[in-house]
Image (cartoon, rainbow, N blue to C red):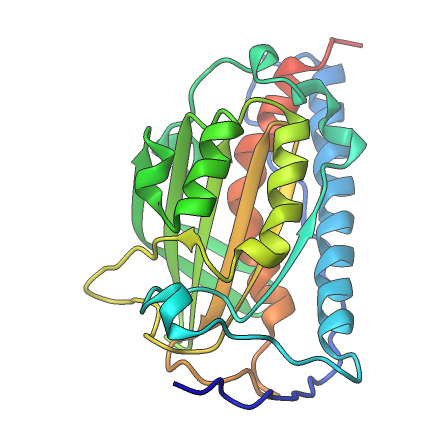
Amino acid sequence: MTTPPARKRRRAPAKAQTRSAPPTEERRLSRGQQRLLVAVASVAGVLAAAVVLAFVIDSMGNDFSPERATAAAISTQPRPDAYKGWVSPKLFAPIAQSKADTAPLTLKDVFAEKVLKEGRTTLRLAATKLDTDCSAAVWGQGLAGRLTEAGCTQAVRGLYTSADGRHVAQYTLLNLRDAAAADGLVQSLTTMHRGGWPHPLESARVRFPAGGYTEASGHAMGHYVGLVWIGRADGAEPGAKDDFISLSLAVRGAEKAVFRRVVAAAPAP
């Protein structure tokens, strides 16, 4: 089986979106902690917009040609055509070690919001799953082994569809040993994603199209790793009407659960 020819794409320029701060409904927090929560979310929103924009710019390079591994290497397993990873920002230092954040993740915690919005993009939650055996949530022996080495204890996945049915997105949150393990994973996936990636969830309403074009990014946040996976529901490459920046920012709304943990672990002012 021959490798498909490289494809070049042009995207219409899009303005980076700034995510609003998560509500401070945790009334048990002090005013100082609430201010910290708002500050963390605001900075994170700026960072998220910056990294997505950088991802787009990088993808638009003169020689950009996302590689596809051979069928022998990846079988028929779905995986992103393009990936970029980002190490943990300093704002997640309070949860750099899992021992400072021992409460396990729950589906209710991570996917508390069933609808996520960013700009004109609206995503609706279609399916969720939590695995305590991280290797069961992914395909690829290399990736499964890397998760074991990183001390992965939980893999939480959520599948979303856009309100108009045009796009599909999946967010995976991995609970690892520490920030060093998280940074190493997002960086190793730069090449490892070709031979290993989280299994896509399915629902009666939406699924990732087999063989369709998709993009992904990895974000280390203290001892957590968030994997964003997006694409068009029909599997086509993005066109002028496909705002992948807003789509990526919208699905990262699930990270509010991580922001809350930063505040809980940070010392009170």
Quarter of the figure with residue 12 = bottom right
Q: Residue at x 51, y 75 (%)?
A: 68
Q: Is residue 24 visible?
A: no
Q: Is residue 40 left or right of residue 169?
A: right
Q: Position of residue 156 (x, y in %)?
A: 39, 38
The one of 163 and 183 positioned closer to us in this rendering: 183
Residue 232: quarter of image: bottom left
Q: Which residue does the image show at 74% across and 56% down from the upper left? A: 51
Residue 103 spot, x, y in % from top left: 46, 15
Front position in the image: 93 or 265? 93
> Which image quarter holds the C terminus?
top right
Residue at 51%, 43% (x, y): give it.
Answer: 254
Foreground of the two, 224 or 71: 71
For residue 252, side relative to residue 92 (left or right)? left
- Residue 37 found in image quarter: top right
Q: Is residue 258 above or below residue 252?
A: above
Q: 202 above or below 66?
A: above
* Residue 118 at x, y percent in the picture: 59, 60
Q: Residue at x 58, y 75 (%)?
A: 67
Q: Position of residue 55 (x, y in %)?
A: 72, 65
In the image shown, does 65 or 116 lie closer to the viewer?
Answer: 65
